[in-house]
Image (cartoon, grey):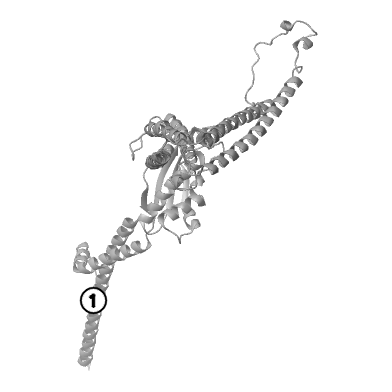
Amino acid sequence: MSISVWDLFKYLYKWKIFIVIVTIAAFFMATVYVDRSQTYSSKVIIQYDDACISQGKTLDGKTFDVNEIKSPRVILNVLNDLGYKNKKIESVRENITVSAITPKTVENLKSAKEKLGEEYSFFPKTFMITYKGNSSFESTRDILSSLVANYFKYYSETYLYLATLNEVDYNVNKKNFDYIEQAEQIEDNLKQTITALSSYSKDSMGYRSPTTGLTFSDLLKDFERINEYSMPKIFSKIFEGQVTKDEAILIDRYRERLESNMRDMANSAYKAEVAKDRMDSYLNANLNLFNPDEENGGENPDSVSIMQGVEHDDSNAVDEQTTYDNLITGYANDSISANNKKIDMEYCQSIIDKFKLEKSPDINYEEYEAEVKDEIEAVLVSLEELYKKANINISDYNEYIPAFHIKKLSGVSYFENMSGSVLKLIAIIGGFGMSCVAAIVYEIMKKYALYSKENDDNDDADDNEQKSDDKTKAESLA
């Protein structure tokens, strides 16, 4: 039995439908398996721009640890943001991988140093963050994206100075405060806000919010306008019209405040005096610590020799305050506090004196009170709108600040953990090959069976012919 190549092609053509069906079935089965078993991972590359990271330190001088990106605090915020209440922190954490990206030149330098027996330390500042997720590429991508966003926020809150503002109590005019007290609270908050905005205006280098379109300088002008024009007008009307809800209660409050300031001033003045006495004692005790005349046997101090060319090593210098420095600081702070209390005492006394005066019958006090109410209300409404804009600017600026310290070098991408296309290709090739082999083997076995049957028939015919010949010979001999 012989089989040619042409016979093989004939067998394949004969079973072409079977081969196609098996190949399609293999592809379908592979597709179902991939769809059921496929999982996704996502990755992103981040880079720190602070020079201290290249020294293995954070901005506050502590040891840098990039694994803070998968700290429980960060992951908890991620789960809260995405609404995964039933997902455990550890299940996310164990699937996060942080790997440093080291330049090839650094690796070569390190190898060369190690061959020479020298130590070489390198602290990377570029890292790849990988998250191995589940069967949903959207969920996998969103978790890593939220992880990076929350880590940037965590990094900013932990290591960076973020802008903040103290807002006014917009309901201060509806509480149990007299008009002068309402105006004082508003003015105090205004001054704090103006101080903060002045600082941000200098430090932000003209930053303009993409949401409001305003700079900190623009906001500063609006707050200064209220502080310089609206507030003095309110104070003027309060004093001129002796506007108060209850004169007796107001005078009692400011008398208590005056007495409290008096006690605080006396206490601060005493502490400042004690500090001054200690400074004088400390100075007198150190006057003779170094006397050039005694060091040179009573000779002229000009004869003291000066050593030339001596270099001072500052490598081990320690930045610390001496006892005298602490005394000076304490003295200054207590003196300033005493002076501030004295100023507030004088202010309280002026209010007491003003509101104790007998009211003039020529002044319409009700009209003054109505105007004060309206103007305080107008200022609070204006401030509420201003603070909304200011807080948006602050929020935008705080999101902008980290870009100078840490940034993404790539977008958040996802990829398949199982190569579905390769698996499907293998299934197609395998299904096609196995069906072809099966078809050829079947045809060969079929041909072989036919060939064997024909040989058996020929052998039977030969046996019968031989028997017939033998019978004929036997008969002839008989």
User: Taking 17 as reference, is 242 above or below it?
Assistant: above
| Badge 1 element | helix
Please count the marks in the image: 1
Image quarter where the C terminus lies is: bottom left
Disc 1 marks a residue whose amino acid type is Leu
Residue 224 horizontal side relative to residue 281, left or right:
left
Q: List x then y, in percent, for residue 16.
A: 20, 67
Q: Toward which corner of the image does residue 459 lie, by quadrant?
A: bottom left
Question: Circle 1 is placed at which residue position?
Answer: 450
Residue at figure coordinates x 66%, y 32% from the top left: 266
User: Taking 331 as reference, is 136 above or below it?
Assistant: below
Residue 198 horizontal side relative to residue 274, left or right:
left
Is any part of residue 82 visible from this angle?
yes
Is any part of residue 409 visible from this angle?
no
257, 386: nearer the viewer: 257
Image quarter where the N terminus lies is: bottom left
Q: List x then y, in percent, for residue 178.
A: 49, 43
Q: List x then y, in percent, for residue 271.
A: 68, 31
User: Taking 285 as reference, is 21 above or below it?
Assistant: below
Residue at figure coordinates x 47%, y 32% from the top left: 195
Estimate how packed mark 1 is, as few (under 14), some (14 to 19) or many (20 or more) residues with alpha carbons within 10 Å: few
382, 476: nearer the viewer: 382
Q: Toward which corner of the image does residue 317 lie, by quadrant?
A: top right
Residue at figure coordinates x 28%, y 65% from the top left: 28
Residue at figure coordinates x 76%, y 18% from the top left: 289
Q: Residue furthest bottom?
A: 478
Q: List x then y, in percent, for residue 244.
A: 48, 41
263, 198: nearer the viewer: 263
Residue 424 horizontal side relative to residue 240, left or right:
left
